[in-house]
Image (tube, rainbow, N blue to C red):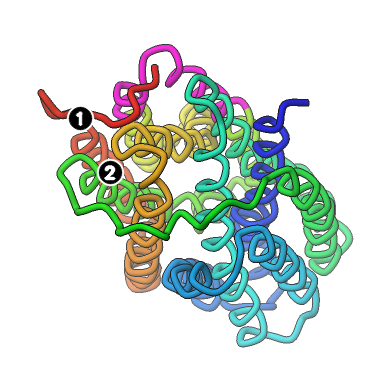
C-alpha cells in the first residue's frame, strides 16, 4: 500500500473519531435525549453549542502544542482523549457532565482536524491531492452513516446503549487511526518559518471557511429534531434522514474530490458552496419528501467541501505554508461556529422557528460561494490540476 494512501486512511479514521463521532453523532440523539427527559430542549441545544465552542479552544491551543510536542504523539493523544469523552458520555449524570465531555471532545476535534489535514496534504503528491483529501473526509461520512444506522436501532434498547455503540465505533477508529498515521515520518515542524502574510486569496478562503461553519449549524444541531418533532414525522423518519446524510457524506466526499481533480479546485469549491446553500435552505421552504431526501444527501456531502477547500488552500499558498493557513481556517471555523452556534441556538429557543435558523445557514453558504470565486490574475503557488 502506498504511504500516502495509508496516511489518508489514518487521517480518515482520525476524522471518523473526532468530527464524525465526536461532533455529528450527537445530532440523531437530540430528540431521544429530550423525549427521555435527560435534558430539556434548551439544554440539548446548548450541549451542542458547547461542543462547537470547544472546537475554538482546540484551534487556539494548537500553536502552544506545536511549539512543545511532535505531531504524531499529539495526534495519538487527541485520539485517546476523544475516546475517553465518548465513553464518559454513556453515563447519565446530567447537563453539566455532558457539557464538559462534549466540550472537551470539541477541543480534540480541532486538534485532530489541524494536525491530520496538515500532515496528509503536505505529504501526498500533487496529483493525488484530490483523492487523498477525499479519503480523509470520507471518515466523517462513514461515522455519520454508522451513527444514522446504529443510533435508531440502539435507542430501542436505551439511550445508554446508543452512547455505548458510538463509543465502540470510536474505539475501532482510534486503532485504525494509530495504524495509518504511524506511517508518517517525523520531519522538522512546519512552523519553523514565519507564517505567510494575510493575502487576498488565502484570506477569502479563511472567511469562506468560517461562513461554511455557520452554514452547517442548522443541520448539525436541528436536522433530525426538525424532521422528527418540527414536521411531526417521528424518530424513525428522523433516523432515516440521518442515514441519508451518511450516504451523502460517504459518496459525496469522494465525488467532490473527483470533481476537484477534473474541473479544478477553484471551480469545484464555488459549485459545492452553491449546492450546499440550496440544500440547507430549501427544506424549510418546501418540506416535501423528495426535498428532505435531497437536503439530507446534499448536507451529507459537506465534508467534501472541506476536502476541496483544503486542496484549494494548498494550491494558493503552497505546501510549506499550508499548515499555517489551515490553522487559520480551523480558527475561523471555531470562531464562526461558536458565535453562530450560540446565536442560532438562542434564536431558536427564543422563537421556536426552524425556518429562520435554516435560512441563515443557507445564506452563509451562498456568501461563501461568492467569496470563493477566483479573482482574475491571481497566482497560485502549487498549480495542481
Q: Is the magenta stretch mostly helix, strand or loop?
A: helix
Q: Say which residue appears at 62% left-offset and 78% top-offset.
A: 39
Q: Give the range drawn in magenta.
A: 251-271
Above or below for 18 versus 276 = below
Mark 2 surroundings: few (<14), some (14-19) or many (≥20) residues within 10 A? many
Query: Which structural element holds mark 2?
Result: helix
Quadrant the N terminus occupies = top right
* Residue of label 2: 205
Q: Where is residue 160 drawn, in percent x and y?
A: 83, 69
The disc at residue 115 is none
Query: Which structural element holds mark 1?
Result: loop
To which quarter of the image does residue 334 belong? bottom left
Q: Say which residue appears at 53% left-offset and 46% top-offset.
A: 117
Q: For residue 153: magenta?
A: no
Q: Say which residue appears at 32% left-offset and 53% top-offset.
A: 210
Above or below for 300 versus 22 = above
Q: Which of 140 and 222 is in front in this view?
A: 140
Amino acid at each position: 500500500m502506498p504511504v500516502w494512501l495509508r496516511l489518508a486512511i489514518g487521517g480518515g479514521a482520525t476524522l471518523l473519531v473526532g468530527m464524525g463521532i465526536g461532533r455529528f453523532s450527537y445530532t440523531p440523539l437530540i430528540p431521544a435525549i429530550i423525549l427521555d427527559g435527560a435534558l430539556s430542549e434548551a439544554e440539548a441545544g446548548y450541549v451542542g453549542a458547547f461542543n462547537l465552542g470547544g472546537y475554538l479552544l482546540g484551534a487556539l491551543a494548537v500553536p502552544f502544542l506545536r511549539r512543545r510536542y511532535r505531531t504524531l504523539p499529539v495526534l495519538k493523544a487527541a485520539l485517546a482523549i476523544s475516546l475517553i469523552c465518548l465513553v464518559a458520555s454513556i453515563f447519565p449524570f446530567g447537563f453539566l457532565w455532558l457539557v464538559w465531555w462534549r466540550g472537551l471532545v470539541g477541543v480534540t476535534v480541532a486538534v485532530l482536524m489541524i494536525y491530520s489535514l496538515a500532515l496528509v496534504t503536505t505529504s501526498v503528491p500533487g496529483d493525488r491531492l484530490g483523492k487523498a483529501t477525499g479519503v480523509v473526509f470520507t471518515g466523517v461520512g462513514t461515522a455519520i452513516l454508522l451513527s444514522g444506522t446504529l443510533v435508531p436501532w440502539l435507542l430501542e434498547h436505551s439511550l445508554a446503549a446508543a452512547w455505548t455503540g458510538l463509543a465502540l465505533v470510536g474505539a475501532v477508529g482510534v486503532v485504525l487511526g494509530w495504524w495509518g498515521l504511524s506511517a508518517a515520518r517525523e520531519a522538522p515542524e512546519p512552523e519553523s518559518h514565519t507564517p505567510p502574510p494575510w493575502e487576498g486569496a488565502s484570506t477569502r478562503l479563511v472567511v469562506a471557511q468560517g461562513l461554511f461553519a455557520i452554514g452547517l449549524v442548522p443541520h448539525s444541531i436541528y436536522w433530525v429534531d426538525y424532521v422528527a418533532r418540527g414536521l411531526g414525522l417521528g424518530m424513525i423518519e428522523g433516523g432515516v434522514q440521518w442515514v441519508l446524510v451518511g450516504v451523502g457524506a460517504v459518496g459525496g466526499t469522494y465525488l467532490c474530490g473527483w470533481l476537484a481533480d477534473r474541473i479544478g479546485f477553484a471551480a469545484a469549491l464555488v459549485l459545492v458552496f452553491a449546492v450546499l446553500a440550496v440544500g440547507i435552505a430549501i427544506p424549510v421552504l418546501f418540506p416535501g419528501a423528495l426535498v428532505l431526501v435531497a437536503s439530507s444527501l446534499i448536507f451529507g456531502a459537506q465534508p467534501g467541501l472541506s476536502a476541496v477547500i483544503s486542496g484549494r488552500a494548498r494550491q494558493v499558498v503552497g505546501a510549506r505554508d499550508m499548515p499555517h493557513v489551515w490553522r487559520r481556517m480551523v480558527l475561523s471555523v471555531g470562531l464562526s461556529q461558536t458565535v453562530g452556534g450560540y446565536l442560532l441556538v438562542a434564536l431558536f429557543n427564543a422563537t421556536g422557528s426552524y425556518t429562520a435558523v435554516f435560512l441563515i445557514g443557507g445564506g452563509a453558504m451562498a456568501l461563501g460561494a461568492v467569496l470563493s470565486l477566483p479573482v482574475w490574475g491571481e497566482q497560485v503557488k502549487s498549480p495542481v490540476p
